[in-house]
Amino acid sequence: MLPRYQFPNGEFVRFGDSHRRLEEDVYSYEMMNRLATEHNRTDAQRRAAGAILRLIDEGKYDRSKYERQTYVYTRPLKWLWFEPELNGEMIPVVFPRTDSLAHAGLILQRNAEDAENGMMCWQGGAHHVHAHATGMNMELYGLGNVVGAEGGRSVYGSEIHTQYYILYAAHNTVIVNNASRGSGGLAELGQDTVQVVSAEPAPRTSAVSPECSFATTVFTNLYGADVKKAEQQRTMALIRTTPTTG
C-alpha cells in the first residue's frame, strides 16, 4: 500500500485484512520499472524509478544487497525483472488533503501532517476488501491516535473470524434490520461499493479553505434482513479551529 494512505503517526488505514503497520513493496516497484521500460510507458517508469530512488535515499533499500529479499517466490526473478540502471529522479511522498482508493470505495481527508496535531478521517467499503463485508466503514485520527479503530483481522477460519471480523459487526458502520452480513461464502462475500457524492477538496486537488474539508458518500446495503435494500449516506468533515485543535 502506498505511503499516502498513512495516518500522521505512520500507521496505515486498515480495511479488510490489511495491517496497521506496513512496509512498501520495493520489489513491486522494481517490476513496474522493468515492465514500464520494456513497453515504453514513460510516466509509469518515472513513478516507479522515483519511488525506488526515494527508498534508497531514506536508507530503506540497497539494490546491491538483494539477498535481503526473503520472499522466495520473487527472489530468483531479479535477473528478469530488474533494470540495471534507474532512469529518473527521486519523487518525494505527497500527502494530499483528500485522497481516494477507488477499488476499496475509500476516500480520506487530512488536515496537518504532524503526528500529534494532525487530523484525519476516512470512509469506505467494497466487496474488494479481502472478503470482508464492512458496510460503510470509517476511521478517525486525532491527538496522535487512531480513534474508533476498524476491526481488522483474526485467525483465518476461526469462529471469531467467520462470525465477527468479516461481517458488519466488526466495523464502524450501520447495521440495518439486525443483519450483519454480505452475500456468498467466506472467500466470496459480496456487497456494494461506497461511492463518493461530493468532496471538498476533490481528491489530489487544492482546497478552497485551509481549515475545512468534507466528503459525502453513499452506500446500498443489498443484503439486509429479508433482502430489503437500505440506502445510506454519510458526511464526514474536518474543521480546524486552531493549529492544535479541531
Image: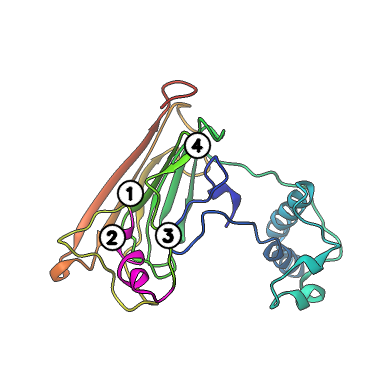
Please provide percent x and percent y for residue 68.
77, 65
Question: Where the N terminus falls, by quadrant?
Answer: bottom right
Type of residue at label 3? Gly
Which mark is nearer the camera, 1 or 2? 2
State which region is magenta.
Answer: 156-171
Do the residues bearing badges 3 and 4 touch, measured as CB atoms within 8 Å? no
Q: Give the answer, above or below, for where 147 lies relative to 154.
A: above
Q: Which residue is mark 4?
A: 144
Q: Which residue is mark 2?
A: 169
Type of residue at label 4? Gly
Type of residue at label 1? Thr
Is residue 92 highlighted in magenta? no
User: SS of the residue at dot 1?
Assistant: strand
Q: Quadrant of residue 72?
A: bottom right
Q: Which residue is mark 1?
A: 217
**Cα separation between marks 1 and 2:** 20 Å
Q: Is residue 113 left or right of residue 78?
A: left
Give the mark, 4 or 2, whose residue is nearer the N terminus. Answer: 4
